Amino acid sequence: SQQGEEDPQALSIQEGENATMNCSYKTSINNLQWYRQNSGRGLVHLILIRSNEREKHSGRLRVTLDTSKKSSSLLITASRAADTASYFCATDGTDSWGKLQFGAGTQVVVTP
Amino acid sequence: ETGVTQSPTHLIKTRGQQVTLRCSSQSGHNTVSWYQQALGQGPQFIFQYYREEENGRGNFPPRFSGLQFPNYSSELNVNALELDDSALYLCASSVGTVENYGYTFGSGTRLTVV
């Protein structure tokens, strides 16, 4: 079963626009992580936010975490065609250290 | 890009056969986890090994088994293959728990069971 659920399932934007995707989860977490996957290949770790953090930045990425609502968002600013990929949130639960629970992902297409 | 190497890249097996997938962890990483990703879905946790001992298992039957070797490389074995085992199998390594650094994933092995 999936712990997290991403919203939307798919997102189509033009280069230069911002892309925002959301993740909701069900149980208490140690941290939440976002990963990118290109064309069904391996996942690339983007950013990790701990349960006591509310916002984190890495380059063009901004992640927020609201533990009271059990939700997170990933913002990609000034999107590029190379950002076309599937994005997954994964939770590291307090009852399952290191065993990540992934959502079904958001498929992002960035057109030139 | 990634320090985790998986082999083979693609594999086709017949229902009922057995398969072994291999993973070489990134240097210095002593924890390895295996995930199954069906088409259009997120990865599902199979099991994790830490210093050659199983350290947690997901909701997968016993015909899914694993090993971690002293050099921290790892194998995933699946017996009595079923059609639903067709998926991308991902290996991920980390230094201890992922609380600080997240996982480094390999490119995966695409298994097709016919």
Image (cartoon, helix red, strand yellow):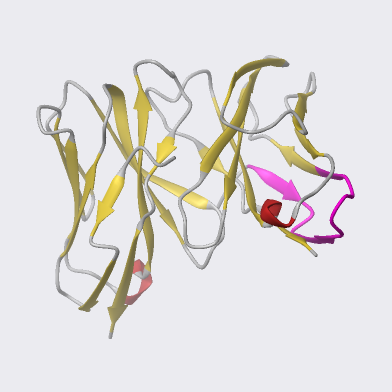
Q: Is residue A103 left or right of residue B76?
A: left
Q: Which residue lies at the image location 39% right of the left edge and 15% below the top edge?
A: A95
Looking at the picture, how far across and down is residue A52, in whole percent? 17, 20
Pick the residue in front: B62 or A82: B62
Please indicate whether residue A59 sits to the left or right of residue B8 in the image.
Answer: left
In the rendered image, the residue lying farthest to the right is B17
Q: Quadrant of the C terminus of chain B?
A: bottom right
State the extent of the magenta-drawn residues as a range: B4-20
Question: Quick check: can you spot residue A96?
Answer: yes
Horizontal and vertical percent position of residue B4: 64, 42
Q: Residue at x 29, y 76 (%)?
A: A110
Query: Compared with residue A10, is residue A90 higher up or lower down, i.e. above or below?
Result: above
Q: Is B14 on the left-hand or right-hand side of A10?
A: right
**Magenta stretch: residue A46 in it?**
no
Figure quadrant of residue B110:
bottom right
Residue B32 visible to an observer of this rendering = no
Vertical placement of residue A6 versus B74, above or below: below
Q: Is residue B12 magenta?
A: yes
**Image location of residue B94, percent across then percent down:** 54, 28
